[in-house]
Amino acid sequence: MEQLEELLAHTDDVNGMLARYGVRFGIYKNQVFREQLFPFDPIPRVIEKEEFAYLEKGLKQRVTALNLFLKDIYSKKQIVKDGVIPEDFIFASSGFLAECDGVMPPKGIYAHISGIDLVKGKDGTWYILEDNLRVPSGASYPLIARSLCRRASPDTFANLKIEDNRDYAALLRRTLDHVSTGGHTVILTPGRYNAAYFEHSYLAEQTGAHLVTGSDLRVVDDKLYFEDAGGRLERGGAVYRRISDDFLDPMTFNPKSLIGIPHLYDVFRRGNVALLNAPGNGVADDKGIYYFVPKMIRYYLGETAILSNAPTYLPFYEEDRRYVLDHFDQLVLKDVAEAGGYGVRFGKDMSPEEKEAFLAALDKEPRRFIA
Amino acid sequence: MKRFHFYYSMREDYSEEVSRCYFTIKCVPRTDARQRIEAMKFAFVPGASWQTGRDAFGNDQLWGVCDTPHTRYEFHTEGQAVTGLADYEEEADGSQLPLFRVPHGLNVPGPSILAYHRNWMEELSQAGSPMAKALLLTHALHRDLVYTPASTTMDTTAEEAMAQGRGVCQDYAHILISLLHLEKIPARYVTGMIPGEGASHAWVEVLQDGRWYGVDPTNDGTAAEDHIRIGVGRDARDCMINRGILFGGGRHTQKVLVRVTELTEASLAREA
């Protein structure tokens, strides 16, 4: 405990350094963008070795099944033919992108970097809260916090047995290189007004990838090029893109996107560039699909899910719909198409008017919600 | 079998110079079970560097960039089409069928579509095959909708067109697809060319016994020998003929010209 107390004595120093390094995260509230410092509490949440190994195993299993699901959905769709998941949940989902149908990403990998949210129940059981497979962010924050803690109190880390996370950048780089089609590796950011801009720049620095915006990239013939500081065009082989599918390529997705790269998806379709994560992943992290992930694990891997979902109800099924109506005040309700905390409501916090509007929406589009 | 000469051209004029434009064009008919395309030519003015490829629905597309500064851009394509080689196209492996069963984009039903469907539910239940149902709806729509040029836009939904009772070929096709989905019949949107239209045309294909058959609600009949197919998709947005991103350009106007002429024995002899 002595070592920990030493670290706690440096709390203000660590927070001071986080501020100096500009470790921020932005949020949009009522259409206003605000950047906030990450408040850091050095009292660790201890996960012991065995529990960590259990989580690691469970997460690997889950991400493996989700990747197999994506590969299946964008090719043969066998899981739908076999009746494991109703087709409405997949093909009417805004996360399913028909443009991606039949396109195989380099090495067949869809979700390279996944942000799976976990929660520990009062009884000590871990639950999966949601899967984020599109453009998850967050890895940089524990990394820099740990490195600043280490600097503030080196003894804490020298004398305690702590799982080292300093290989994250190397692992990320290896992932990028593994799928790269040859050429430079870039991290594509929407720019400094993005919520996770700190993270983009930090990961670029740590992995040695170029930090670029859409205007630094260009498609020539059927390849992607990156314009370096000297104005030379260099091949781009892997793009760790931190902009959403919709904005990625105005020729294939949203035509109004100004931050995308025209024809990027055509280059991807030809197999001439890797995109991390692959476009179209929204079909697997839709909250309506979440319910089916344990079934996917059984279907693709023939295994029982190691990590359980939080108890979930799908109003799509009549039995669940009745449960939701009967226990409204005890439930958390989510709009399946939203992510990152948006579209989450507590039944007990709704005013009577809000509740009425919500129930009307639920009645009209039961597929849109989970509880 | 019929033989046609087809000519498709698109011209855009800009009020200010365009320094660069990216484009994706899907107006290239291709040989399939029903039609054979011969002597295809195309040209970009003032020029372009382009690639050919296929989209997710198997449509041919030309995509590329024009780096020559210009205030007018033209694309021309022409060739011959031999049509009526078959009445249908076999569905490949069925893997994309769910996409043509689930309401999407511009063909999502609303109150007007649902009410219209309810009116015809009984007749439909007695109509029998998917094609019989499609033709029943085609006749009904042809009678109940008023073909009105410029009454809708590229973004008008099936529901909006149904509610106002007016539209063009694109709207007729979306409405029919939407109604067929309510009957659990896979249906898809087709773009193409027909003689005498002057612009591109749109109709519907319906799945029956693993085969896709064409129905043209605008012309109240099947789509057969007179229809030269270009692209398929779930709705018009999937088969947009022309998509572009311009640098510069100011205001622009677009003109599209489509000419489809049947080549009869007599006309071929005259040319020879």
Image (cartoon, coloured by chain):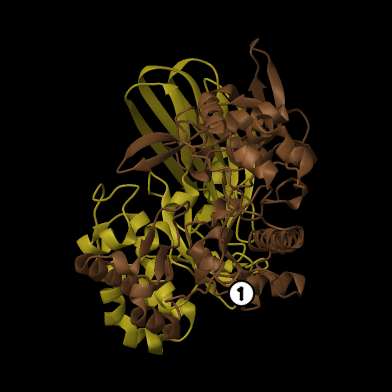
A243 up-or-down from A336: above or below:
above
B256 vs B63, left or right, is: left
Q: Position of residue A67 (x, y in %)?
A: 69, 58
Q: Position of residue B226 (x, y in %)?
A: 48, 57
Q: Residue at x 62, y 62 (%)?
A: B85
Where on the picture, by quarter, is residue A73? bottom right
Residue B181 vs B161, above or below: the answer is below
For image coordinates 53% across by 40% down, the residue present is: A40
Q: Is residue A306 above or below residue B173?
A: below
Q: Position of residue A33 (x, y in %)?
A: 36, 36
- Can residue A180 be seen here? no
- The residue lying toward the viewer, choosing from A124 and A281, is A124
For chain B, give the colour: yellow
The answer to which image quadrant residue B255 occupies is top left
Name the quadrant of the N terminus of chain B: bottom right
Q: Colour of chain A?
A: brown
- The front one of B222 and B151 is B151
B70 with respect to A209 (left or right): left
Q: Position of residue A370 (x, y in %)?
A: 44, 69
Q: Which residue is mark 1?
A: B210
The residue positioned farthest toward the top in the image shown: A230
Q: Residue at x 67, y 51 (%)?
A: A110
Identity of the residue drawn at 66% across and 68% down: A307
Viewer-nearest residue: A155 or A258? A155
For label 1, the SS is loop
User: What chain letter is assigned to the residue under label 1?
Assistant: B
Task: Locate the C terminus of chain B and report the quarter of the image it occupies.
Answer: top right
